[in-house]
C-alpha cells in the first residue's frame, strides 16, 4: 500500500498545540510564519498608499515640504526612533530566550518592549498636543497661530495632513502591538509557551519589527528632509 | 510521521542581536547628521538609502530571514516590488502632469488650411467657410473662457464661488487694467477668503502664458469687463 | 494508445484500495453534510466545504439583489426620460448595482465558493491552512457588506461604484459607511487569499508537486496573490476618503489643494487587479471543464499555469488605462496603453490552449461544457474589446460610453459568471450528492447565451454611436437599441431564474449522484459523494500521476472506455462498476 495513514489517527505523542489538519508541528509553524509574512506585506501595501501621497505632494511642492518639516522636532523623532529600535531588540531577545526555555527572561524582555512602546506613544502624544496648541491640525483645520505665520503657506496643510495620517495610523499599529505583547506576556508567565511551541511570540515579534521598520522610514521623510 | 521531535529552529545569538542594534543606532545618528548637511537634492536619496539599510538589518537579523525558509524572503521581495510599482507608476503621471502642452494648440483642420494657403491653394469651399467662421469665434471672450478652462474654477453667470471667486460682476468691480493684471499676475491681489498661489501654477501648468495671443487677451479682458452682474 | 509504463503497478495498488473504500466503506455514508445538521454546527464550522456552501448562499443572494437592480436600470432605460423612476433614484440604483455586484458578488464568487470547496481536496489536503481564519473571512465579508448597505439609510449613494472625488466626499454620511464597509469586506478578501497561498504552498499531499497541480489550483493561487497585494491599497484609499470627509485632510479635494486624479490612481491600483481576481478563477474553471469534457490533458499545461501568474503580475501595471481622459500625463497614458496590449498575450495563450485541448479530444457535451463553450465565445469578445479600449485614440471616443459597459459585462458576466455557472454545475454532484436535470440545464444555458448577447451586444453599438454610460436620459435615436437590450435582459433573467430553480429542486428531488459522473481524474473525484467526514480522504493520498492523466483512468477508477458511455449518465446506483 502506497498510502500513509498516520494523518487520520491521533497518536499518543500528539502535542496539544498541534492542530488536526496539520501533519506535524513543523508544518504548522512554517505555515503560520508564511501566513504572517503575507499579512506583513499587506500592511506594507497599506502604508505604501500614504508614502505615495507624501511623494506625490513632495514632488509638486518640494520647498513647502522641506520648510514645514522644520516645525517637527527631530530630537523627539530621533529619540522615538532609538526607543523603537531598542524595542525590536528586546522582542528579538524575548524570542531567543523562549527558544532556549528561559521563560522568565522572555517575560522580562516582553515587558521592556511594552515599556518602550509606551514611551514612544507618550512622546507622540506630547508632539501631537504641542501641534494642536499651535493650531496645527490636519487638513481643513490647519490654522497655525501667529508665531508660525510663516508656515501658513499653500500646501503646508497637505504636509501636515500626511504627517498626522501617517503617524496616526502608525501609532494605532503601535497600540495594537502593545495589546498583543501584553497578552503574550500573560500567556508566557502562565506557561503556555516552550521551545516546542512559541509561535504566537514569533508572529507578534515579526509584526513588531514591521512597525519599527515603518517608523525607520517615517522619521527621515517627515522630520529630517 | 506526526511524531514531534523538536526540530531545530535557528536561535540567533544575543551577540548578533546586540551588534545589529548598535549598527541600527549608529545609522540613526548618521541619518540625522547627514540631514543637517545641505546637499541639495541628494539629501533625499541619502536619507532613504540609510533607511533602507536599517530596514534590511532588521529584516535579515531581527526577523531572521537570513536563516528562514526562502519562500518568506520571496514574499517580502514581491511586496516591496509592488510598493515600488505603485509609487513609480503614479509618479509617471504626477511628475509629468501637464506634459500635453507640447501638443499643438491648432487642430489638424486649421493646420491643413494654413498649409493650403501657404502653398497658394484655395482651401475647399467648406474649409473656407469654416475658416471664416472660425476666426470670429476665436475672439469670442466667452468661448475663450471655455478654451482656457477658466470655467473650471470660476462661475461667470451667477454669484457662486468655486475654487476661485465668481466673476459674474467682475466688470463692475475691477477696471480693465486690474482685470488684465489679475490674469497676468494673479497673486498681486488675492480675493478675500480665497487661497493664493493656485491660479498662477495652474495657468503655468497649462502653458497659458505662452499660448494666449495678444488678440485673445484683449478679447478676454473686454469680455470680463462687460460682466456687470445683472 | 497511450503507453503506461512502470508506474502502473503502484497505481493499481493505491487506487484499488481507494476504489475499495468508495464502494464498500460504510463510513462513507457519514459525509460533511449530514454528520451534524444543527444550525450551530453550520454557523461555527471550520470545515472549508461548509464555509464554501455558506458563501454560495450569501453570494447567490447578492447576485439576486444586484440582478434585480440591473433589471430596474434596464426598465428605466426603455424610454428616454422618466420611465419608472426619477433621476436621483436612478443614480442610486445603478451605483448600488455596481457596488453589490463588484464587492458582494463577483470578487468572492469563484474563489470563496469553488476555491474553498474544491482546492484543498484537489491538492490532497484535509482543509485549508487556517480553518478558523477561513470562517472569520466569511463573517467579516458579511459584516462588511451589511455596513455598505447601511449607507443607504443615511442618504444618497449615487457616486457610481467608483466613488470618484470630489463628488464622493460631498454626499455626506453615506460615504462613511461605504468606505468602512468596503474596508472591512476587503479584509475578508485578504484573509482568504493569504489562507489559500499558504495552503497551496504547505499543505499539498505527498507527491503533489507544482507540476501536478490541477490548473484550477494554479488559477486560485494566482488570484490569491492578487488579492493579497492589491486589496490593502483599496483599504488605505477608503481610509483616506473617510478622513477626507471627516477631517478634510485635502489629499483628494481640489478646493483644499488636493488632487482628485490621485484618488483615481489609488482606486484603480486595486480595482484593475480586482478584475483579474474576478477572471483568473474563471480561467481555472475553464481549464478543468475543457480537460474533462475533451477527455484530454489541457494543451500546454506549463504555459497555461504560468500565464495565470503572468496575468496576476502584469495586471498591476495597467491601471491607468481607466484614466486616459482624466488629465493624467501623456507619458503615463502611453506607458499604460503599451502594457495593456501586452496583457492580452498570456490571455490569448490560454484561449488558444483551450481550443487546442478540444482538438482531437473526445468532446462530450454536457451542461458544464456548454457553459465552457459559451465562455470561449463571450470572453473572447470581451477581451478583444478590452484591447480596443486600450488604444489611446479610440478610448478618447469610447471612454464613459456604453461600449465600456458592454466590454466589462462581456468579460465579467460572459466570462466570470458563465464560468462560475459551469463550475457550479460541474461540481454540483460532488458538493450536494445530487444531479440536476440535464435538459433544463441546456435550455437555461441557451436562454442565458441568447439573452446575454441581446442585452450587451446592442450596447457595443450604442456606445460606439455615442450613448454615454450612467445617463438617465438619452437621445431618441438610441431608443430602439435600448429597448432591444432591455428585452434581452428579460431573456437572460429567465435563464438565470431557471438555473436557480432546477438547482434548488435537485436538492430535494434530484437523483443521487455517482461519485464521478464526469469520469474526471482530479483528486476530488476519487472520493465518495458527498465528501466524507471528518477528513476529505479516508487515507492520505500519495500522488504519482498528473492531474489530467485520463489514460490512467481505467486503473485509477476501474472504468473502461471514455466519458461518453451509457453508464456515465447518472443513476441511483453506487459509483462506477468495476472492470
Image (cartoon, helix red, strand yellow):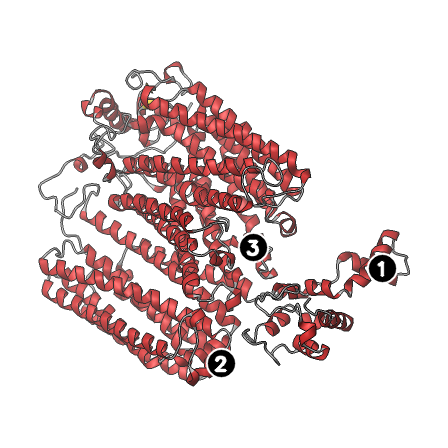
Report in which chain the residue with disc 2 lies.
B
Q: Quadrant of residue C132?
A: top left
* The label number, if any, that marks residue B40 in the structure image: 2
Residue behind mark 1:
B132
Q: Secondary structure at mark 1?
A: helix
Report if residue B132 is visible in the image.
yes
Residue found at the far front of this picture:
B230
Residue found at the far top of this picture:
C566
Question: Relative to A37, is A144 above or below?
Answer: below
Discs 1/2, front? 1
Image quadrant where one finds the N terminus of chain C: top left
**B217 or B90, nearer to the observer:** B217
What percent of the width, then of the height, locates residue C534?
20, 33
* The label number, if any, that marks residue C323 in the structure image: 3
Q: Residue at x 44, y 67 (%)?
A: C249
Report in which chain the residue with disc 3 lies.
C
**C520 or A166, nearer to the observer:** A166
Image quadrant where one finds the C terminus of chain C: top left
Report in which chain the residue with disc 1 lies.
B
What percent of the width, then of the height, locates residue C150?
38, 48
Q: Is residue A145 left or right of residue A215?
A: right
| Crowd rating for badge 2 (residues with CA inside 10 Å; few <14, some 14–19, many 20+) | few
- Report the Cα–Cα distance between label 1 and label 3: 36 Å
Q: Residue at x 18, y 37 (%)?
A: A7
Amino acid at each position: 500500500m502506497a498510502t500513509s495513514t498516520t494523518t487520520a489517527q491521533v497518536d499518543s505523542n500528539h502535542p496539544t498545540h498541534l492542530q488536526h489538519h496539520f501533519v506535524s508541528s513543523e508544518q504548522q509553524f512554517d505555515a503560520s510564519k508564511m501566513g504572517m509574512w503575507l499579512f506583513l506585506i499587506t500592511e506594507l501595501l497599506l502604508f505604501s498608499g500614504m508614502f505615495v501621497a507624501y511623494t506625490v505632494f513632495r514632488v509638486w511642492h518640494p520647498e513647502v515640504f522641506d520648510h514645514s518639516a522644520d516645525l517637527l522636532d527631530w530630537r523627539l523623532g530621533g529619540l522615538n526612533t532609538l526607543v523603537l529600535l531598542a524595542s525590536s531588540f528586546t522582542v528579538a531577545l524575548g524570542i531567543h530566550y523562549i527558544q532556549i526555555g528561559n521563560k522568565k527572561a522572555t517575560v522580562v524582555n516582553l515587558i521592556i518592549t511594552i515599556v518602550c512602546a509606551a514611551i514612544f506613544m507618550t512622546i507622540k502624544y506630547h508632539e501631537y498636543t504641542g501641534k494642536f496648541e499651535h493650531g496645527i491640525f490636519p487638513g481643513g483645520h490647519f490654522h497655525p497661530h501667529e508665531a508660525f505665520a510663516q508656515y501658513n503657506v499653500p500646501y503646508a496643510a497637505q504636509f501636515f495632513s500626511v504627517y498626522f495620517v501617517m503617524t496616526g495610523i502608525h501609532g494605532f499599529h503601535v497600540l495594537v502591538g502593545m495589546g498583543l505583547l501584553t497578552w503574550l506576556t500573560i500567556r508566557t508567565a502562565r506557561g503556555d509557551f516552550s521551545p516546542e511551541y512559541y509561535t504566537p511570540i514569533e508572529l507578534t515579534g515579526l509584526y513588531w519589527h514591521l512597525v519599527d521598520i515603518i517608523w525607520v522610514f517615517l522619521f527621515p521623510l517627515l522630520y529630517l528632509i | 510521521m506526526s511524531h514531534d521531535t523538536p526540530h531545530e529552529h535557528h536561535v540567533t545569538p544575543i551577540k548578533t542581536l546586540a551588534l545589529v542594534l548598535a549598527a541600527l543606532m549608529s545609522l540613526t545618528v548618521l541619518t540625522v547628521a547627514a540631514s543637517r548637511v545641505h546637499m541639495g537634492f541628494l539629501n533625499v536619496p541619502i536619507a532613504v538609502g540609510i533607511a533602507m539599510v536599517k530596514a534590511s538589518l532588521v529584516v535579515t537579523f531581527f526577523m531572521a530571514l537570513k536563516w528562514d525558509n526562502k519562500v518568506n524572503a520571496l514574499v517580502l521581495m514581491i511586496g516591496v516590488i509592488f510598493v515600488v510599482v505603485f509609487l513609480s507608476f503614479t509618479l509617471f503621471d504626477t511628475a509629468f502632469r501637464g506634459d500635453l502642452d507640447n501638443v499643438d494648440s491648432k487642430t489638424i483642420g486649421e493646420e491643413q488650411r494654413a498649409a493650403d494657403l501657404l502653398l497658394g491653394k484655395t482651401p475647399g469651399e467648406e474649409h473656407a467657410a469654416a475658416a471664416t467662421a472660425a476666426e470670429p469665434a476665436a475672439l469670442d471672450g466667452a468661448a475663450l473662457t471655455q478654451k482656457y478652462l477658466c470655467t473650471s474654477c470660476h462661475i461667470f453667470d451667477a454669484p457662486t464661488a468655486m475654487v476661485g471667486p465668481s466673476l459674474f460682476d467682475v466688470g463692475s468691480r475691477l477696471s480693465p487694467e486690474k482685470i488684465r493684471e489679475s490674469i497676468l499676475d494673479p497673486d498681486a491681489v488675492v480675493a478675500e477668503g480665497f487661497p493664493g498661489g493656485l491660479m498662477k501654477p495652474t495657468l503655468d501648468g497649462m502653458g497659458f502664458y505662452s499660448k494666449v495671443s495678444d488678440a485673445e487677451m484683449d478679447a478676454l479682458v473686454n469680455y470680463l469687463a462687460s460682466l456687470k452682474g445683472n | 494508445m497511450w503507453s503506461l509504463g512502470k508506474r502502473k503497478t503502484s497505481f493499481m495498488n493505491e487506487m484499488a484500495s481507494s476504489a475499495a473504500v468508495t464502494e464498500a466503506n460504510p463510513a462513507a455514508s457519514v459525509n460533511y453534510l449530514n454528520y451534524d445538521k444543527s444550525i450551530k454546527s453550520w454557523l461555527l464550522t471550520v470545515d472549508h466545504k461548509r464555509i464554501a456552501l455558506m458563501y454560495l448562499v450569501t453570494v447567490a443572494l447578492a447576485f439576486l439583489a444586484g440582478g434585480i437592480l440591473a433589471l430596474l436600470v434596464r426598465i428605466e432605460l426603455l424610454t428616454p426620460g422618466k420611465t419608472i423612476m426619477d433621476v436621483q433614484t436612478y443614480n442610486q440604483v445603478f451605483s448600488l448595482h455596481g457596488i453589490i455586484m463588484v464587492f458582494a458578488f463577483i470578487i468572492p464568487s469563484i474563489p470563496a465558493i469553488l476555491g474553498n470547496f474544491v482546492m484543498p481536496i484537489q491538492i490532497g489536503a484535509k482543509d485549508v491552512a487556517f480553518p478558523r481564519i477561513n470562517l472569520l473571512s466569511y463573517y467579516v465579508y458579511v459584516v462588511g457588506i451589511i455596513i455598505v448597505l447601511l449607507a443607504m439609510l443615511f442618504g444618497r449613494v449615487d457616486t457610481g461604484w467608483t466613488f470618484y472625488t470630489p463628488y464622493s466626499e460631498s454626499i455626506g454620511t453615506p460615504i462613511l459607511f461605504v468606505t468602512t464597509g468596503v474596508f472591512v469586506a476587503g479584509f475578508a478578501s485578504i484573509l482568504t487569499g493569504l489562507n489559500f497561498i499558504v495552503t497551496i504552498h504547505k499543505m499539498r499531499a505527498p507527491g503533489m508537486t507544482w507540476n501536478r497541480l490541477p490548473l484550477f489550483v494554479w488559477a486560485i493561487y494566482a488570484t490569491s496573490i492578487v488579492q493579497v497585494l492589491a486589496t490593502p491599497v483599496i483599504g488605505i484609499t477608503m481610509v483616506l476618503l473617510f478622513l477626507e470627509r471627516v477631517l478634510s485632510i485635502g489629499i483628494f479635494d481640489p478646493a483644499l489643494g488636493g488632487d482628485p486624479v490621485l484618488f483615481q490612481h489609488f482606486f484603480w491600483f486595486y480595482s484593475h487587479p480586482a478584475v483579474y481576481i474576478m477572471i483568473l478563477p474563471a480561467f481555472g474553471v475553464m481549464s478543468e471543464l475543457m480537460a474533462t469534457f475533451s477527455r484530454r490533458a489541457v494543451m500546454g499545461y506549463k504555459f497555461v499555469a504560468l500565464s495565470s501568474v503572468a496575468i496576476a503580475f502584469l495586471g498591476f501595471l495597467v491601471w491607468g488605462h481607466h484614466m486616459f481622459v482624466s488629465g493624467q500625463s501623456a507619458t503615463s497614458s502611453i506607458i499604460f496603453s503599451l502594457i495593456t496590449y501586452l496583457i492580452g498575450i498570456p490571455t490569448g495563450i490560454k484561449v488558444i490552449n483551450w481550443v487546442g485541448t478540444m482538438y482531437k479530444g473526445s468532446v462530450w457535451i454536457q451542461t458544464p461544457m456548454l457553459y465552457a463553450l459559451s465562455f470561449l465565445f463571450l470572453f473572447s469578445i470581451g477581451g478583444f474589446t478590452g484591447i480596443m479600449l486600450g488604444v489611446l485614440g479610440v478610448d478618447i471616443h469610447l471612454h464613459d460610453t456604453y461600449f465600456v459597459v458592454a466590454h466589462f459585462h462581456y468579460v465579467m458576466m460572459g466570462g466570470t459568471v458563465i464560468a462560475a455557472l459551469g463550475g457550479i454545475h460541474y461540481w454540483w454532484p460532488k458538493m450536494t450528492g445530487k444531479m440536476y436535470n440535464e435538459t433544463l440545464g441546456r435550455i437555461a444555458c441557451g436562454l442565458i447565451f441568447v439573452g446575454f448577447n441581446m442585452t450587451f451586444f446592442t450596447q457595443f453599438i450604442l456606445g460606439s454611436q455615442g450613448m454615454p454610460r450612467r445617463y438617465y436620459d438619452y437621445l431618441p435615436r438610441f431608443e430602439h437599441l435600448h429597448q432591444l437590450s432591455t428585452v434581452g435582459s428579460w431573456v437572460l433573467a429567465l435563464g438565470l431564474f431557471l438555473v436557480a430553480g432546477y438547482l434548488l429542486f435537485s436538492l430535494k428531488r434530484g437523483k443521487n449522484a455517482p461519485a464521478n459522473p464526469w469520469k474526471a481524474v482530479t483528486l476530488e473525484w476519487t472520493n465518495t459523494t458527498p465528501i466524507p467526514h471528518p477528513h476529505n480522504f479516508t487515507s492520505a493520498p500519495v500522488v504519482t500521476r498528473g492531474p489530467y492523466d485520463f489514460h490512467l483512468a481505467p486503473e485509477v477508477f476501474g472504468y473502461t472506455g471514455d466519458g461518453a458511455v451509457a453508464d456515465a449518465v447518472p443513476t441511483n446506483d453506487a459509483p462506477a462498476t468495476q472492470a
